[in-house]
Image (cartoon, helix red, strand yellow):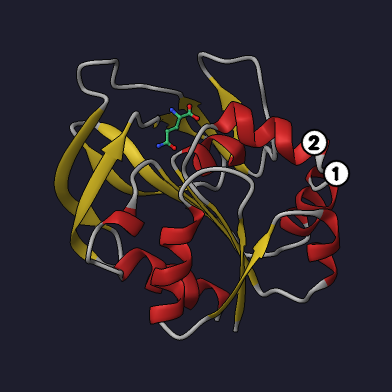
Amino acid sequence: MTVAVLAVQGDFAEHESVLRSLGAEVFEIRQKSDLSRHFDGLVLPGGESTVQGKLLRELDLFDALKEKIETGLPVFGTCAGLILLADRLSNDDNVYFAALPATVRRNAYGRQLGSFYAEEEFKGIGKIPMTFIRAPFIESVGEGTEVLAVVDGNIVAARKGNVLGIAFHPEVDENKAVHKYFLDMIG
Ligand code: GLN
C-alpha cells in the first residue's frame, strides 16, 4: 500500500520513517506533479497550519487534495494536520479541508503548557503515549464524528469515516499503534 505524506512544511520525515517501518510504500507530496502518482492514503503532518494552508494554495495542491479527501481517500492529520481537517476553528477564521465535523481550538493549551506528555486510552488500541507540542484540541464534534481519545476532559483524537484527526504527535514516540490504526483504515 502506498501512502503520500504532505511535505511542504513540518515534521513529515518522522511520519515517513514510521510508515516505512510498518511496511508501507511512502512518497512525498511537494508539488502538483506529485499528485499524478497513485496513493491509497494521505498523511498531513504537524507543523504550522497557517503556513501549510498558504503553501497548499500557492502550490496549487489544495483543490485536488480536498476533492480526493471528499471522495473517500483515507487521511490522517496530526496537530496542524488536524487543524487543516477541521470544519471549524474556534479561535481562527480560517477553514481548510473542512473534512472532519469538529470544532478545533489552535494552541489550545496556552504558552506554559505548550508541550507535554500524557498516557491515555485510544479507542480500539488501548493506552498509548501522547506527546503534545503547541497542540490544538477538539472542543466539540459534529454529526457522525467519533471521539477516539480524551485527555484531561479534552478530545484529542476523532474520526469520521475516512478522516482521522489527532492533536498529538505519535511520530515522535516509539509506539506505532496510531500509524498502524491508520494503515488498517486504508485496508
Ligand atoms: N500550533 C500549530 C498550529 O496552530 C500546530 C502545532 C503542531 O503541529 N505541532 O498550526
* The label number, if any, that marks residue 60 in the structure image: 1
Residue 16 on image: x %, y %: 48, 67
Depth check: give the residue in front, 44 or 12: 12
Q: Measured along the vertical axis of the image, is residue 5 above or below residue 142?
A: below
Question: Which of the 4 quarters of the picture holds residue 125?
Answer: bottom left
Q: How many marks?
A: 2
Residue shown at the point (84%, 52%) measured from the top left: 64
Amino acid carrying label 2: it is Arg
- In this picture, residue 116 sits left or right of residue 137: left
Residue on which the image places disc 2:
57
Percent position (x, y) of residue 152? Answer: 18, 32
Question: 63 or 50: nearer the eye?
Answer: 50
Q: Residues within 10 Å of mark 1 (few under 14, many from 20)?
A: few
Q: Nearer the viewer, residue 69 or 110?
A: 110
The span from disc 1 to disc 2 (Cα, nearest Å) is 5 Å
Figure check: 159 above or below 58: below
**Element under disc 1:** loop
Residue contact between numbered discs 1 and 2, judged by CB atoms under 8 Å: yes
Taking the spot 44% from the left edge, 40% from the top edge, the residue there is: 79
Q: Which amino acid is tagged 1?
A: Asp
Please give left or right for residue 62 compared with residue 132 in the image.
Answer: right
Toward which corner of the image does residue 161 lie, by quadrant?
bottom right
- Residue 138, how many percent across, how many down? 41, 32
Residue pictured at 40% horizontal, 30% vertical: 136
User: For the residue labelled by badge 2, is the local secondary structure a helix, a strand or a loop?
Assistant: helix
Q: Quarter holding the N terminus?
A: bottom right
Residue at coordinates 70% horizontally, 40% vertically from top-left? 97
- Ligand 1, image quadrant it occupies: top left
